[in-house]
Image (cartoon, helix red, strand yellow):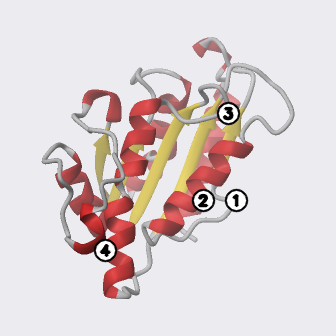
Amino acid sequence: MLTLSIYGSPGSEGFSSTLHNEFLKAFEEKGIKIVKVFPYRSDINPCIACGNCRDKPQCIYNDDMTEIYSLIREADFITISSPLYFSSFPSPLKALIDRCQLIWEERRRLHSVDRFKRGFFISTGGAEYNNMFAGVVMGIKHYFNSIGVTFSAENTVLLPGVDALGQISLDILNKIRHTGNTFINY
């Protein structure tokens, strides 16, 4: 089994990354291989809607997405974490998501029926306001659907009001670890 874990944060030790790492402890304990991808550290060009992937199984760019496409196809689980940037994804993560148009087009062309893949999403935000995560939850729902990954709103952890790392309590870390264990055993 393979878990592809995509970290949308520019910092590997920020809120969303810390929660993501705790969530993955259940996967590690079960011996499931985890491959971590960090869009901020990756060479990912933005999609330019050129249409090349509509008819061909390749993107015009030969960058880090080439390997990420393979990982997406191979993964049994895809977990994504992201801080909230103006109610949306940070731009490097959004570039990765947009470049998966290639997989959407591939699935459309081949009328593919994917094997069972499951997705999970973790997001954090410094502020607290009504519906602050609505945009990213809708975006991640459409993304997972486009790449053939089963996802529902229950497969999220959304944590508002976290501006300093010290605010992640032991209770929150225990809950996210338990959530990871529940998800993997579902």
Quick one: label 3 or label 2, which is nearer the N terminus? 2
Alpha carbons under labels 3 and 1: distance apart? 19 Å
Quick one: label 3 or label 4, which is nearer the N terminus? 4
Disc 4 vs disc 2: which is toward the camera? 4
Helix, strand or loop at label 4? It is helix
> Picture coordinates of residue 104 (x, y %)?
39, 68
> Picture coordinates of residue 105 (x, y %)?
35, 71
Q: Which mark is residue 172?
A: 3
The residue at the point 67 percent across, 32 percent down is 87
**Image quarter of the N terminus:** bottom left
Alpha carbons under labels 1 and 4: distance apart? 26 Å
- Where is mark 4, residue-wise? 106
Helix, strand or loop at label 1? It is loop
Quick one: label 1 or label 4, which is nearer the N terminus? 4
The residue at the point 31 percent across, 43 percent down is 36
Crowd tier of the residue under label 4, counting other residues whose Cα lies within 10 Å: few below 14, some 14–19, many 20 or above: some
> Picture coordinates of residue 11 (x, y %)?
41, 20
- Where is mark 2, residue-wise? 141
